[in-house]
Amino acid sequence: MIRCIEKGVVLWFTGLPASGKTTVARLVAERLKASGYRVELLDGDWVRRTINVGAGFSREERWRHLLRVAWIARLLGRNGVIVLCSFVSPYRGVRGEIRRIVSEEVPFLEIWVKCGLRECMRRDPKGLYRRALKGEITHMTGLGDPYEPPEAPDLILDSEVWSPEFNARLVLDYLARRFGIDA
């Protein structure tokens, strides 16, 4: 049974590469879908392979890339879809612009998946940090490019302390309390 909601919500997961953003977002998406909600997961890797092929990693290119995603998320959300966006989105300014774009029509939640650089580098599932340290990748967030932590996120998930399953439960509980979305 599909559970239609009049207006969706956009959950924007931000954090360093390898912090666990997509892992938690996938778990949340699975649980919401199993409960009958319409859900879309927009992940940075997938968007760069499909919708925004050739997007670069300079500050300006990231800004444009993320604003495109914000408009897509807004469109989906206003049509009753719960949208989970998993993007490093390293700059406060662009996250503020994303919030402005989305929240004109749809509730927006900024979720910081907090994890220290050392732990992200230890995890490094794609080998990005290793390649950046060898000079093969430029503009690597956390090394050659800054990550500006959110100043007032709606939710903080500490992925060094809590498991992905626990963090997903925190998100689902928040959705239930704030929007009556139960899963």
Image (tube, rainbow, N blue to C red):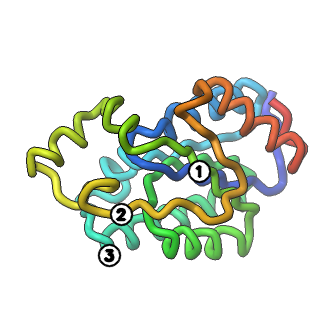
Q: CA distance from mark 2 to mark 1?
A: 15 Å
Q: CA distance from mark 3 to mark 1?
A: 22 Å
Mark 3 vs mark 1, foreground winner is 1
Secondary element at tag 2: loop
Is 95 displayed left or right of 106 in the figure? left
Graded by Cα atoms within 10 Å as few (under 14), some (14 to 19) or many (20 or more), the crowding at tag 2 reads: some
Q: List the residue tagged with mark 2.
A: 146
Secondary element at tag 3: helix
Labelled pair 2, 1 in contact (Cβ < 8 Å) = no
Q: Which is more toward the observer, 92 or 29?
A: 92
* Amino acid identity at mark 1: Trp
* Amino acid identity at mark 3: Glu
* Amino acid identity at mark 2: Pro
Hey, which quadrant is residue 4 in on the image?
A: top right
Secondary element at tag 1: strand
Graded by Cα atoms within 10 Å as few (under 14), some (14 to 19) or many (20 or more), the crowding at tag 3 reads: few
Graded by Cα atoms within 10 Å as few (under 14), some (14 to 19) or many (20 or more), the crowding at tag 1 reads: many
Q: List the residue tagged with mark 3.
A: 60
Q: CA distance from mark 2 to mark 3?
A: 14 Å
- Give the residue drawn at x 63%, y 27%: 30
Hey, which quadrant is residue 3 in on the image?
A: top right
Dot 2 or dot 3: first in sequence order is: 3
Q: Pick the quarter of the image with the N terminus.
A: top right
Q: List the residue tagged with mark 1.
A: 112
- Give the residue drawn at x 41%, y 49%: 44
Q: Pick the quarter of the image with the C terminus.
A: top right
Dot 2 or dot 1: first in sequence order is: 1
